[in-house]
């Protein structure tokens, strides 16, 4: 691996690898949609600021926005081993220090900012996850000082030559923990830091940087399904899923907008009738507890014609079972390696990162071997057709397992009288409150 002089330097091997990584990241999701590419400025330095809810998948998803070079930051402690540092530098990831890393590490913050500014000055896009750490919730942690310091310092260094922009990126996952779920990427309108600082010079450096953090927070809240992180979080999110799951099944963007609208209505109801909201949320929390005990997903509950859907899903599973068997036979080392690896990782938010990485390495090698065997044993057109059909094997296996899970959930829902009674009780309460 060639040693890079600077993390942002061009590297041919990295440039080629990017295409493969982007492909596997997109294949990690059943639906992958990006909106707002037109909001990315072309006349200045760009700092991406995505929300951080799904560990390593967040920067990997941001990476797919465009094929141009991007430099990311990660916590400094993982750079301690020279070999790991070399690999991370090749992947265009540089360390950033946090208070939790100790006083000595924080002293290196100025160096991190200096390197970040150099990256931007070399016309390479920079990405920092402003919350500092990940959390699998439809909410936000406090925006850290890092993004404000870097953008403020970049403006001092080169703001007279070109504007500095922060581009908030909202990442909305269908499920944080299941492989082959969905992801909606929404790129917000850029925040022109140069203009903002110029218009607020009299407020002083501290207040300007606090203002930058607030601007980033507000922009991200608009591009994610935001639920206040308090004791009512689970109840609010459950109500929203039950409501929007029945009206927006296929469009990620429509479902996002419906969730935003419905959560705003819930919050208004909570503000206007706190006692009624408290009673409602207590019922919802009890419903969630019983639903999870029964291993029933909200998608099963909101389906129209549940019996017909369950029968059709079962028939489809039986019909494609031979295909599933073949796909499993050729890709079982990948599936097994994935699940053994994630079983040893306590933080579930890392599971899909491991699955994506293991699939990328192991399946690529296996697929190359399969292709060689096919072209050595079959006519070229048969080999080509078989290779094309073979390529999505691991992804199709995961899709089949997901259909099995959903089908089992639907059948359990059909025969769970207790949960149905609780659901109808909940609907009646919503009707009484004239809230449905």
Image: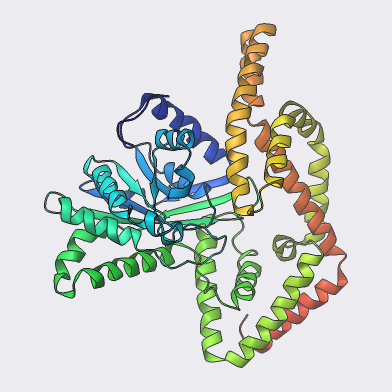
Q: Is residue 312 left or right of residue 245?
A: right
Q: Nearer the viewer, residue 82 or 143?
A: 82
Q: Is residue 22 visible?
A: yes
Q: Quadrant of residue 164?
A: bottom left
User: Please, which colouring scheme is shown?
Assistant: rainbow
In the figure, 390 relative to 420: above or below? above
- Residue 242 in the image: state x and y as whole percent: 66, 69
- Residue 150 in the image: state x and y as whole percent: 28, 55
x 48%, y 45%: residue: 78
Q: Residue furthest left?
A: 160
In the figure, 58 relative to 285: above or below? above
x 63%, y 54%: residue: 347
In the figure, 328 relative to 167: above or below? above
Q: Quadrant of the N terminus?
A: top left
Number of labels in the image equals 0
Q: Is residue 213 left or right of residue 22?
A: left
- Residue 286 in the image: state x and y as whole percent: 75, 77
Q: Nearer the viewer, residue 283 or 161?
A: 161
x 47%, y 66%: residue: 141
- Residue 171 in the image: state x and y as whole percent: 48, 55
Q: Quadrant of residue 337?
A: top right
Q: Quadrant of the C terminus?
A: bottom right
Q: Quadrant of residue 88?
A: top left
Q: Is residue 75 visible?
A: no
Q: Nearer the viewer, residue 30 or 94?
A: 94
x 41%, y 58%: residue: 98
């Amino acid at each position: 691996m060639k040693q890079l002089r600077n993390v942002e330097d061009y590297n041919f091997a990295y440039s080629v690898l990017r295409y493969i990584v982007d492909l596997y990241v997109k294949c990690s999701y059943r639906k992958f949609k990006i909106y707002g590419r037109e909001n990315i400025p072309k006349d200045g330095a760009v700092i991406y600021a995505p929300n951080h809810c799904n560990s390593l998948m967040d920067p990997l998803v941001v990476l797919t926005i465009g094929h141009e070079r991007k430099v990311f930051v990660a916590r400094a402690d993982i750079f301690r081993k020279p070999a790991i540092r070399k690999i991370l530098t090749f992947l265009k990831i540089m360390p950033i220090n946090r208070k939790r890393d100790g006083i000595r590490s924080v002293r290196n913050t100025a160096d991190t900012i200096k390197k970040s500014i150099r990256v931007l000055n070399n016309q390479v896009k920079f990405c920092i996850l402003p919350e500092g750490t990940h959390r699998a919730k439809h909410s936000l942690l406090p925006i850290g000082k890092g993004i404000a310091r870097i953008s403020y310092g970049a403006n001092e260094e080169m703001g007279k030559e070109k504007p500095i922009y922060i581009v908030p990126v909202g990442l909305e996952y269908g499920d944080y923990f299941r492989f082959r779920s969905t992801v909606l990427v929404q790129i917000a309108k850029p925040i022109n830091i140069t203009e903002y600082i110029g218009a607020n010079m009299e407020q002083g450096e501290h207040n300007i940087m606090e203002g930058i953090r607030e601007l980033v927070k507000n922009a991200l809240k608009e591009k994610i399904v935001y639920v206040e992180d308090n004791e009512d979080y689970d109840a609010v999110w459950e109500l929203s899923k039950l409501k929007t799951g029945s009206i927006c099944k296929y469009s990620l963007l429509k479902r996002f907008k419906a969730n935003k609208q419905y959560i705003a209505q819930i919050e208004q109801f909570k503000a206007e009738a706190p006692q009624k909201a408290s009673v409602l949320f207590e019922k919802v929390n009890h419903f969630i507890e019983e639903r999870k005990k029964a291993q029933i997903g909200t998608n099963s509950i909101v389906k129209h014609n549940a019996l017909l859907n369950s029968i059709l899903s079962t028939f489809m599973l039986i019909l494609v079972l031979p295909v599933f068997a073949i796909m499993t036979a050729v890709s079982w080392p990948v599936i097994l390696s994935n699940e053994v690896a994630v079983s040893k990782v306590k933080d579930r938010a890392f599971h899909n990162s491991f699955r994506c990485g293991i699939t990328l390495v192991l399946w690529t090698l296996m697929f190359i071997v399969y292709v060689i065997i096919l072209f050595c044993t079959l006519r070229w057109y048969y080999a080509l057709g078989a290779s094309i059909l073979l390529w999505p094997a691991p992804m199709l296996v995961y899709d089949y397992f997901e259909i099995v899970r959903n089908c089992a959930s639907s059948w359990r829902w059909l025969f769970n009288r207790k949960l149905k009674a609780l659901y109808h009780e909940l609907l009646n309460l919503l009707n009484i409150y004239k809230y449905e």
